[in-house]
Structures are given as C-alpha cells and as structure tokens.
Amino acid sequence: MIETIVFYLFAFSTVVTATAVVTVRNPVHAALFLVLTFFTSAVIWMTLEAEFLAISLVLVYVGAVMVLFLFVVMMLDINIARLREGFVKYLPLGIAIAFIMLLLMLNVVTSDIFSSEAMLEPAAKAADYSNTKALGSVLYTEYVLAFEIAAVILLVAIVAAISLTMRKRSHTKYQNPSEQIRVRKADRIRIVKMPADGE
Amino acid sequence: MIEFIAIFVSYLPEWMQYFWPDWFQYIVANVLLALILLLPLFIVVAYYTLAERKVIGFMQIRIGPNRVGPKGLFQPFADMFKLMFKEIIIPTNSNRYLFIIAPIITFAPSMAAWAVMPFTDTMVFADINAGLLYILAMTSIGVYGVIIAGWASNSKYALLGAMRSAAQIVAYEIAMGFALVGVLMAGGSLNLGDIVESQSGGPWHWFVVPLFPLFMVYLISGVAETNRAPFDVAEGESEIVAGFHVEYSGMTFAVFFLAEYANMILIAMLSSLMFFGGWLSPFPSLIGDSIGWLFFKTAAFMWLFLWFRATFPRYRYDQIMRLGWKVLIPVTIVWLTVEGVMVYFKVGPWFS
C-alpha cells in the first residue's frame, strides 16, 4: 500500500521533472530539473530494493556528473534566442523522430518479454540481504570480462578527451610549483651589511 | 521508540486511540528519534561556533567573546537571536525561488547524513548495509546548495565562489571516495558499525595504522569538502568578499553556517569511526568501550579543524587543484594497491 503510494508519487515527479528538463527556457533550470529527475529515479530504484544502485546513482550522477554540467552551463553565456532559431523549421523532423522512438519503445514494452506474466513481482529479500555483496560477486566473477572491457573503454575515452583538449598556450602565466617550493632565501634576497650612519 | 509510543497510546482513552493508527505511530516515533539526534547536534553546532572563536582567540593571544553570560557562554544564543530577527534581504535581480531554496539544499543533506551514524554497537538509528555509501552520497548533494546560491544571487562574487566550490568539491570527492574504498576493503563492509567492530583489539588494530596515507588524504579532503580554511576559497574574504553567500542575510545565512559546522562534526566523527576505532577503548584491558571514547575522538578532530584555521594561510586556487588531482588521488591509488597486496597476504592483525 505505502510502497504503491511512494512509487506513484515519485514516478509522477520523475515524469514531470523529465518533461521540465526539455521544456524550460533557462539551461540552468533544465540542469537542476535533470538533477531532480535522477534523484526521483533513485528513489524508484530504492523501492525495487536496489539500494546500492540507487545510492550510487545519487553519488555519481547527482554528486559529480551534474555538478560539472552545472559548472559548464553557468560558465557559458548561452544565447537562448539563437538556440531557439529554426524551431519551426526542424519541428516536422523532430516530431517524426519522436514518433518513431515512441513506436519502438511501445514495441519493446508491450512485447511478451515484459508482460506481467513473464515478469512476476520478485519476492522481497530478507532485511539482512546485502545488495552490494550480491552485485559485487557477479560483477567480478560472471561478468568480469565485460566489466574490464568497459573499464578499458572508459580509460581510452579519458585519455582521448585529455589529448584532444590539451594544447600548449604560450601566454599562460603558469607557475611551476616544485620550482616555487625549492626557492631558498639566498636566491631572492641579499643581506647587505653596512656601517651605521652618523655618530 | 515505536514500542514506547505504542505503550503510550495504549494508556490513552479509547476514543483518542482512534487517532493513532499504526502508521501514524510509526511516523511520530521516527520524528521523535530524529529530534533526539538533531537537537543535541544543534547544541553542539552552536557551541562549536563559540569554541572556534575562543580557541582561535587563545591561539592569537586574544580573549574572544566574553560579554554575553559568564565567560561569554551565552554568545551562541545571542548570535542566534540576532540572526533570527534580522531581515532576509532578497536581491532584486536574483532568482527568488532558487535563492530561498539554496540554504535548504545545503542544510537538509548535512542533517540527513546523520541518520546512519552509529554511536555505539547498539545505538544506531538506521542500521543500513550501505551506510558509508549513503553518507558519501548525502554529503555530495550539499554542494548544490553552494552552486545554486552562487548562481541565484546574480552577483559576480557569489558566482565566482560557487564556481570555485564546484570544481574543488568534485576534485576532492574523488580522493575522499578512494580513501573510503581503502577503509571498506579493510573492514570488509559498507556498514559503519561493522567497520568499527573489525577494528577491535586495541589501538594497534585501528585502521589508521595500515591505512595512514589514506587517513591523511581523508582528513585533507574532509577539510576541503567542508570549505574550511586553508581550503575556503569558496568564501575567500580577502578576494571575493564572502563568496557564495555574499547576498545572504539573517536566517538564510545562518542556515549555511549550521550546515557547514554540522558537516565538520560529521567529518570529525567519521574519521574517528573509520580510522580510530570509534567507540572502542584505546586501553581495552583498563577501561571498556563506550560512547565517551567516540565523543572524545570526535572532539579531538573538531579541534584540529580549528587549529588548521588558526595556523595555515589560505591555499592559492591552482595549488588546491594541483593538490587534489596530482597529489592526493595518486597517493590513494598507490596505497590501494599496497593494501590489496596486504589483504591478499593477510598481513598483520588487520587483514587476517
């Protein structure tokens, strides 16, 4: 009973916030609504007893990825009027693509694999059931190859992103910290002994 | 707590019991539990602000606040009432809704994180399996308050503070997460109570001994995560006035500070739980384990926060980034490898 209420409450807010992401005018507001969408999805996962995934969703996407997103969106002075240019021109194409995607999704969701007969409600786990342990034990035994391949792909992506964006700029005033630390008093100042003036 | 409420309800006259269905008792019990946890926390936060001023005063050979009450002991209340009665000014061109909601977003996770905090082996409010992960997730949400505050204020200084804070927190969260990975490898659990229990057997068994580099990384990134000196560039009074909270006044300003101090206490308590055996006694043969040890260790770390602030000059911003990305993260990765080897060969009293 209470689970149903929680599910519908958060499912509803997920839909509302996800819609808001693509409809609000301000890009910062859109990013904030996306944060809220992640959060409500995490709560829905929590009702499915996937605590580990729910908390990692909050930790990774809300706590790190979206912070960087917001960082970029706030830094850039995005010209919204320019972005909205040609909205009408591209509208038919957009509607067509949206329609095809809707058909595809309906095709998947209404298929027999996802029917309520094939997908029975899983039995509730005991209170001391550790989601984390269960996930870890399959991730590092059964799916270890897929896991490692995903890790390598991510590593390659990081290296590629860095090498694409790194460029030497001549006019930056970059300080070499190890040189700065190694500086001693004798390098910078000279103490001059002078006889006292007058008498 | 739910039992107490049920007993209390059973003493009420019958017509009143009608208003106390089971789910309502459950809610009342949980709200009361939260109050039992949070009210002492507020008191500690209030006196932590006083302690900060007194301790830094002492370190700088000043007296510190000494006018309100004996030895200035009522100063936190004076501050609180002053802030309560001040006007909350909302800048004209700010985003009103986000401007008001920002302090709440900072405050709520810093309180929510306390839900899974164990105080002794039996005294824990929500004993969940993924407790450590939950705390990490909650503390990582707090940065939104800072970013939203900086952006909604529509002020250049505030935005600069928010940008600095965002980049800094993302950098140090990775180092902090890696340091915690080391702890959960050693403890074999994400549950904070289990982590403390696996350190039992005297101070030599505490995780600070095999994981000393990770402890240092955790402490440094803890200071950076809470935006405290010497990493307080998000506020940076000398450069950007007060950073993200320049435009805030009255209670909205106070709520930011409540959250900051609650986070400092949280980090202090987590360090003592994860690396210093929490409630375990350092002299197991002489004195037993008790909650007093946890409070003592936490107070020691809270003192460290103040000591840092009185001692270190503020970091330069590029140096903060360098320390986070190029020093702390490599240190954690190296030590995680070393720890993996230690776990594999079941070294010492810790990994056997």
Image (cartoon, grey):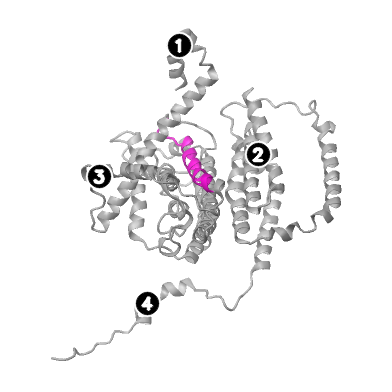
Q: Residue at x 31, y 47 (%)?
A: B50
Chain to which the residue tagged by mark 1 belongs: B
Say above or below: B131 vs B322: above
Residue neighbourhood size for the residue with mark 1, other residues' Cα within 10 Å, grouped as few (<14), some (14–19), many (≥20): few
The residue wearing badge 4 is A184
Label whose residue precedes the other's in the sequence (1 or 3): 1
Amino acid type, label 2 = Ser
Tell me the CA gap for discs 4 and 1.
Answer: 78 Å
Residues at marks 4 and 3, CA–CA distance in whole angstroms: 48 Å
Judged by depth in the image, the label closer to the viewer, 3 or 2, is 3
Figure quadrant of residue B35:
top left
> How would you classify the magenta stretch by its main secondary structure?
helix
- Asked whether B52 falls inside the magenta stretch, the response is no
Which dot marks residue A41? 2
Spatial CA span between label 1 and label 3 = 46 Å
Q: Which residue is mark 1?
A: B10
